[in-house]
Image (cartoon, helix red, strand yellow):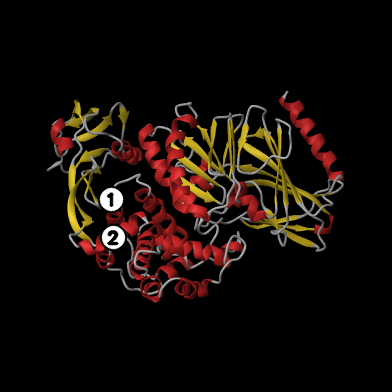
Amino acid sequence: MKKFICTLALALSMASFAHANKGNDVKVAIDLVNVKDDKVMVTVTPQPFKTDNVTFFIPKTVPGTYSADNYGQYIEGFKAYDAKGKELTVTHDDLNSWKIAGAKKLAKVTYWVNDTFDGEAGKEDKVFSPAGTNIIAGKNFMLNTHGFVGYFEGAVESPYEVTITHPADLWAATSMTDIDKSNTVDVFKTKRYAELVDHPIMYSKPDYTTFKVDDMEIVISVFSPSGKIKAADITPEMETMMRAQKKFLGPTNATKKYCILLYLSTVAQDDAQGFGALEHPTSTTVVMPEQMEADYLKSTLKDVVSHEFFHIVTPLTVHSKEIQFFDFNNPKMSEHLWMYEGITEYFANLFQINQGLITEEEFYQRLATKINNAKNYNDTMPFTQMSRNVLEAPYKDQYANVYEKGALIAMCIDIQMRESSGGKEGILSLMRKLGSEYGDNKPFNDSELFAKVTSLSYPAVGEFLNKYVAGNTPINYEEYFAKMGVVKASTTAPGHPFIKGEREAYININKDMKIFLTDVTGNKFFETLGLKQGDVLLAANGTEYGYENVYDLLEAASQWKEGDDITIKYLRDGKEAEAKGKVTIPTMTVEAYTPGTDAAKAKLREAWLKG
């Protein structure tokens, strides 16, 4: 049967040579039925070319990742053919491009695609999972389309028609519209290559929910290998969150359909290892470990998905020319990550206090955590300089600060606008103005943004941007909190059983690559169980741990709750033993912020948090 299917597929493929693309669109065929050695065949039929040579590209990087991922390394067996089926000469000079001689005769190219999930384990430069691809024949295909479909030189603005052949029992979760009525063939059309890249597709057996938020249709699709998590399990929390987000945004967004594609990883050697999400204009791809406790998963999704959803404001609505005309293989990065990621991350926290999903104390604690986390980065490196050079050392090592200091920059702008306007305006009103000034298809010039922001807000905002974002002056956050009547304090917060403070741990690795306790002083978790300094930890709740999966232990422990049953297997003086008891979460003293006694600032603070 396999031989017959392959022979038939080959015959159909050869027959298609006679039908070279005569239209204006680029036609793509993806075969998810005849998977070979965990690889998928892709066929691309281009527009006619007038040049003797043409280059075909697979992206080096894509918007939202801020890293060079070289998706071309996952392409094999690239071939180019003329209309009679004769192979044309192809030169493969670098990872992401193939130069084709005799382009005037080119009828189509074919190639096999490997998935990125298989190659993540132990790889330092692995593709971030939510931007990656997955191939599990007959079960799941994660099609971040940039990993499957490339573009021809000079044709990146051409329309695309993508035909995907798939098993009848697998359903395509995507914000695109399938224009084919067959249950084994899907056809999608986009106006240009960048639009195709912005529409991921996840094929799996149907497990999805839908609901409406105002006039926006929300689709939540889940792939859980064991069936442990269902879309219906997470939908109530997602619906509550997204209704709150829409209410917070008001009329800012015009998206009619939004998809959340959640892939749950087994965390095995051949499965996704990187957890998080990647935003798109009308969807979010999310990868999380399936082992994650349901309540912790829901809480994590609330923060992760809310961040990605707010990207509909920026950079998806308000963005620079570097993003509008993104070069997938020779990218020029924008200098405004403080806005694209920072404002987005700030909104993901602000809307929760604004809509009553968290308390004021919790909001301040989140900001305090970001201030502490930002201390791990270079506080004098101008944010615009880091953003512009984020793909290169030493700037790329500072990237994660966009979620820490970037969000704090947004907070300070918000506070400054509230003070300057007497509480009437904040950063959300600024983004609405920028959205009206620019929009989806009208990008701004990087060098002109600060002046435009200043003209739409207040001189003090412009001064802040030039001094603290383009300049190298560290921000005095207490000065901005004081404008809202918020003062610095300290509080007791739950800690982590194995982590002490911000940069220290209660554990280390010995010469036998085993985990041992370096210190137990003041740690109620260890003291309650009778564990001592020097004990070698072998297993927790039946799962063995060592050097290779120590981070799994830290992740598991972060989900333990006060009073949970716990069993620790350990080695002391060469003898194995078990400690059984209840989890006691250690506490730690942390910096915090709290409303002060200045009653004159209460109304302004209320406008900041609830306006």
| Residue 390 visible here | no
Q: Residues within 10 Å of mark 2 (few under 14, many from 20)?
A: few
Residue occupied by mark 2: 603
Residue at the image point whose x is 53% and y is 48% from the top: 131
Query: Does residue 482 sit above or below 373 in this rendering?
Result: below
Where does residue 101 sit, x and y in percent of width and height?
78, 59
| Residue 399 visible here | yes
Residue at the image point whose x is 30% and y is 51% from the top: 363
Viewer-closest of 337 and 307: 307
Residue at the image point whose x is 77% and y is 55% from the top: 89
Where does residue 36 sit, x and y in percent of width and height?
66, 34
- Say how many tags the image has: 2
Q: Quadrant of the C terminus?
A: bottom left
Viewer-closest of 547 and 179: 179
Where does residue 60 sit, x and y in percent of width and height?
58, 56
Instruction: Kindly identify the amino acid type of the residue bearing the numbered disc 2.
Output: Lys
- Could you tell me which secondary element the residue under label 1 belongs to? helix
Please tell me the numbered disc located at residue 560: none
Residue occupied by mark 1: 360
Viewer-closest of 412 and 68: 412
Separation of disc 1 and disc 2 at Cα?
15 Å
